[in-house]
């Protein structure tokens, strides 16, 4: 009888430990997925990075307009990320659309020379990332 009770306790103990580890792993994965900001996912070499824009010799007016575009974009993304009615996929799609819109607005402000320089910088950045 003692052997049977000991065996049952051991099985329950092992089962509890295994389930605890499994639920901990699932909790970590869930937290990771929830904390991932869809607006920042895969942001490398996408859009008009601040670093690239700084190297374009922008006029004060261009800087001011671009800052406004980026500020509005951040606010819209924040509203989307805080919207509990949207799924993760819907958030990603909306944020992608906002990024595309802001990129187009910024590109419209740049001179042809600045656009060419931006394109060259992005190409260089991609080559560096491959190395």
Image: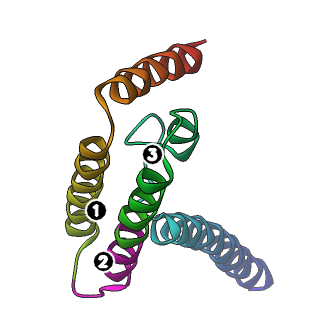
Tell me the SS state at disc 2.
helix
- Position of the C terminus, as image quadrant, is top right
Instruction: Look at the picture and state if 51 lies above or below 122.
Output: below
Instruction: Look at the picture and state if 84 lies above or below 53.
Output: below
Q: Is residue 48 magenta?
A: no
Who comes first in sequence, dot 3 or dot 2? 3
Residue drawn at (42%, 28%) of the image: 118
Q: CA distance from mark 1 to mark 2?
A: 8 Å
Q: Quadrant of residue 102?
A: bottom left
Q: CA distance from mark 3 to mark 1?
A: 12 Å
Instruction: Look at the picture and state if 52 lies above or below 26.
Output: above
Rendering coords of residue 65 (x, y %): 38, 60
Q: Decide: few, some or many residues near mark 2? Use Cα within 10 Å; few <14, some 14-19, many ≥20.
A: some
The segment highlighted magenta reads 73-85
Residue on which the image places disc 1: 95
- The secondary structure that most of the magenta stretch takes on is helix
Residue on which the image places disc 2: 80
- Position of the N terminus, as image quadrant, is bottom right
Residue drawn at (43%, 17%) of the image: 120
Residue 38 makes an appearance in the image:
no
Q: Is residue 16 left or right of residue 52?
A: right
Rendering coords of residue 117 (x, y %): 43, 22
Q: Depth check: 46 or 10 in front?
A: 46
Who comes first in sequence, dot 3 or dot 1? 3
Q: Depth check: 18 or 26 in front?
A: 26
Residues tagged 1 and 2 counted as in contact (Cβ below 8 A): yes
Residue on which the image places disc 3: 43
């Amino acid at each position: 009888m003692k052997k049977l009770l000991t065996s049952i306790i051991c099985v329950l103990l092992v089962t509890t430990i295994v389930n605890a580890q499994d639920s901990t792993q699932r909790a970590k994965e869930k937290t990771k997925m929830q904390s991932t900001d869809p607006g920042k996912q895969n942001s490398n070499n996408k859009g008009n990075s601040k670093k690239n824009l700084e190297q374009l010799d922008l006029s004060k007016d261009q800087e001011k307009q671009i800052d406004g575009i980026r500020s509005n974009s951040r606010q819209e993304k924040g509203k989307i990320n805080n919207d509990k009615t949207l799924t993760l996929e819907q958030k990603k799609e909306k944020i992608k659309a906002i990024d595309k819109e802001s990129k187009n607005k910024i590109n419209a402000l740049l001179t042809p020379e600045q656009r060419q320089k931006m394109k060259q910088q992005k190409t260089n950045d991609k080559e560096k990332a491959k190395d």
